[in-house]
Image: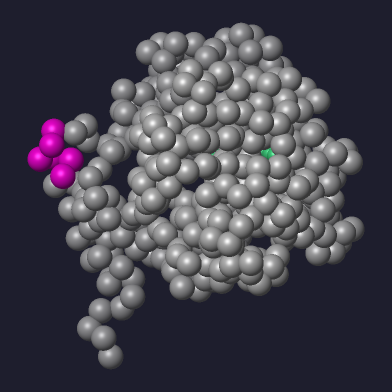
Amino acid sequence: MASTGRLVQLTSLLQEKVKEVDTYIRENNLPDPSFDASYPPVLHLPKQPDAARQAALEALDELRAHLLGPVGTIYESVLDHTSPISLHAITSYDIMNAFPTNATSTIPEIAEKCGMHPDDATTMMRHGLARRLFLQKEDGRIAHSALTRAIVDVPNFSSFITGALDDTWVAAPFVVPAMRKWPGSQEPNQTAFNLAQGTDLPFFEELGKKAESSGAFADRMSFFMSSPGMSLDYAIEGYTWAAHKGGTIVDVGGSHGVVALKLSEKFPGMQITVQDRPEVVARAPKSLTGQVEFQAHDFFTEQPIKGADVYFFRWIFHDWSDKYCIAILRALIPALRTGSRVLMMEAIVPEPGTISGFQERPLRAFDMGMKELFNSKERSEGEWRKLLGDADTRFEVVDVLRPEGSQLGIIVVDWTG
Ligand SMILES: C[S@@+](CC[C@H](N)C(=O)[O-])C[C@H]1O[C@@H](n2cnc3c(N)ncnc32)[C@H](O)[C@@H]1O
């Protein structure tokens, strides 16, 4: 029999890893962790102490589940369905801006400032306070916490929260009803979002009806894109673009051409066309050099640029179910010549069960979000390979790149037809 049980093993591991993080904090004169509004919104750690932080969180996750026990764990997750409600109220009513981050207030003052009924404000604030959204001072007044200050200060964070809660979280209770109504549907307008919003339109078309929703979605995307794992540098440095330095590149669904513009700076001989929906292209910046062109093109219709060296798709296919991904790939085929390269820059999720539940949970949350909004999914390497094979066996995967630190990998595909 082991000399210590699992609980003590996990606690020792936790202590060892936390000590590593704590040592780094002290040696570098970083502020000691606190919930006070003065505490920075993100604790930036280099690789090694960050690995220790992850290991500590993982040990803590298992320790907590063991201490709660099976019924306790499920009971907690059922109760947890209320968890985002106060956050939703805080961003919807702009409570975080009701008083300055260095001042204090009261619930009646907040209610008046935000146009809320005082009873509603009390329920929301009490729920939030229990989650460290704001802090209750000894004199009973309310102050900002490090969390609510982050909502105020971190660019586009509040749009991200509002968007994610307004669109995705409100759709969550409709996932099971949507599956019952449309079992196995691959249609983008037979989703939990459609039931929640009472619309027949796919997500982006519904959003497009209201200008402010499209703008908020763009802000939400900006927050995503600002995370280190989504850096554009991975698109530029994660693949050997030099092999096509005098070639023609088509960035399909390339939005406003941020990747194309960076590529053109690095490779002045490259000719790049960025394709997107007409309303997106209409708002695209004008290229100064003529090296980057924009073209309205629906990627479900035949690709008009024939024989390019590379057809690049970044973060396109995960929005679509297999049926539609196959349609996008097949619309490309008439333009391909032997050796044409297709690059798919996408999340490549590990096969289920190959990483811990703690690591897999956020990936599955993304996967569920894709189901809620689009009836699409995040895919593993095996699923990407199968998708390409189902589209046409002449697509050959020649490499699968996983740039270190990048949230997205690059599936390198050659056309062998
Ligand atoms: C998640 S964004 C990715 C944008 C860009 N590739 C990037 O990595 O930042 C998906 C893009 O696909 C575009 N899109 C959606 N449907 C399209 C269609 N039918 N034809 C062309 N582009 C489309 C959207 O307008 C949007 O720019």
Q: Position of residue 156 (x, y in %)?
A: 51, 25
Location of the N terminus by quadrant is bottom left
Q: Position of residue 23 (x, y in %)?
A: 14, 47
* Rendered residue at 18%/53% (across/down): 20
Residue 321, placed above or below residue 209? below
Task: Determine the image quadrant of residue 120.
Answer: top right
- Is residue 23 in view? yes
Residue 170, placed above or below residue 295? below
Which portion, as a residue range, is magenta?
Answer: 24-29
Location of the C terminus by quadrant is bottom right
Q: Is residue 208 left or right of residue 315?
A: right
Residue 403, placed above or below residue 137? below
- Is residue 68 in view? no
Q: Is residue 53 left or right of residue 155?
A: left
* Rendered residue at 22%/35% (across/down): 32
Q: Is residue 63 magenta?
A: no
Task: Determine the image quadrant of residue 112.
Answer: top right
Q: Is residue 6 left or right of residue 379?
A: left
Q: Position of residue 164 (x, y in %)?
A: 62, 37
* Rendered residue at 67%/51% (across/down): 335
* Rendered residue at 58%/14% (across/down): 110
Q: Nearer the viewer, residue 175 or 14?
A: 175
